[in-house]
Amino acid sequence: MSKRLLHTPEGVRDIYGDEYKRKLKVEALIREKIGEFGYDEIETPTFEFFDVFSNEIGTTPSRELYKFFDKEGDTLVLRPDFTPSIARCAAKYFMESDEPIRLSYAGNTFTNNSMLQGRLKESMQMGAELIGDASVQADAEIIALTCESLFHAGLSDFQISVGNVAFFKGLCAACGLDEETELELRDYISGKNFFAAQDLLEAKSIDPDAASRLLSVSDLFGQEDILDKAMETADNARSRDAVERLRALVDVLKLYGVDKYISFDLGMLSKYNYYTGVIFKGFTYGVGDAIVKGGRYDRLLKQFGKDAPAVGFVILVDDLLNAMHRQGIPVTIKDDLVTLEYTDDTYESVLKEALKMRHVGGSHVKLIRK
């Protein structure tokens, strides 16, 4: 047998022993907290039709999807992202419902990207979606639930950075940028490639003052007072409304008691094009990227036939566990395994004892031969 068969492909790995027990424990804690907020669990398929994650949906680029064909010739993909799958389910099973829908999920996602800088191509995600509620209270509930879930898992030192993509979109619309140019500019700003962003705006003959406002969004980050500066930068109603939404949001988050974990970043943008409003990421020590991502996507469900607003979040469980490990945060796992030894002569009596302990006492018992 080839030793190559013992290894996993690049970007995936085995998890076993105490590490897996700690992972299951953290998952259980997050699931418990999400349940306390009244969210119903849902399980979606590991693979879906390609169109669920197409460019029109605004999710992961096609080149980063794991694609394959079924026997009918349809193109299928391993899910790279849960949100479109949840949107599809909500449209399918709750098409006629006008009541808010609260759904939660857990499972693995798959991204076929060789530029992940050590990140896994298969990752565990847990999250929740609040569908059918366009209010700022819904935004606050999702962010508060994010904080409470991290607390319950054992993490206490983190920051939730909040933005609003409508602020940037308003500035782009005021400049007359077409959608293609807006997406290109967004990629440059997200990648901190400000020289390319400036060259793009000059090539499009954008007014220098308007271009300056667009490039300055990356400087609009900090605590609540940064919203005043953002309002001064806003030159259109859409951008101003986005700032006011953030002001209203922090007022509700103060009622939840989680506002001290909140900061603001008006330059925060996402690779997912389906976000329409409030957007946020969660950061902590020990990992180089966000352990939480989320936001509002009020037009995504319409792609599946149900016109309903929505907001949600996802916790990247593997990254959360790495951060907790590097911060020295213990994850208590129950170790009540009892070992009973037996010989050929004592096997029957020892087996009876093991069955009694399992069935009556609920103990975990394993048998080994002396």
Image: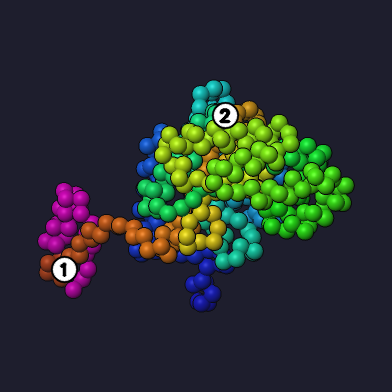
Which of the 4 image quadrants contains residue 188? Answer: bottom right
- At which x and y percent is residue 136? 54, 31
Q: Residues within 10 Å of mark 1 (few under 14, many from 20)?
A: some
Identify the residue at horizontal 63%, vertical 58% (top origin). Answer: 112
Which of the 4 image quadrants contains residue 347? Answer: bottom left
Q: Is residue 350 magenta?
A: yes
The residue stretch that appears in magenta: 348-370
The colouring scheme, among rainbow, by chain, secondary structure or one colour, is rainbow
Q: Count the marks: how many?
A: 2
Residue 263 appears in the picture as rendered: yes
Direction from residue 47 to residue 62 in the image, left or right? right
Label 1: which secondary element: strand
- At which x and y percent is residue 125? 50, 50
**How far apart in space, not on screen, are marks 1 and 2 (Cα)?**
64 Å
Residue 300 appears in the picture as rendered: no
- At which x and y percent is residue 246? 57, 37
Identify the residue at horizontal 63%, vertical 27% (top origin). Answer: 307
Q: Label 1 belongs to which residue?
A: 342
Q: Label 2 belongs to which residue?
A: 134
Label 2: which secondary element: loop
Identify the residue at horizontal 70%, vertical 38% (top origin). Answer: 234
Q: Is residue 247 magenta?
A: no
The amino acid marked with disc number 1 is Tyr
Foreground mark, 1 or 2, reads 2
Direction from residue 13 to residue 348 in the image, left or right? left
The amino acid marked with disc number 2 is Ala
Q: Earlier in the sequence, mark 1 or mark 2?
A: 2
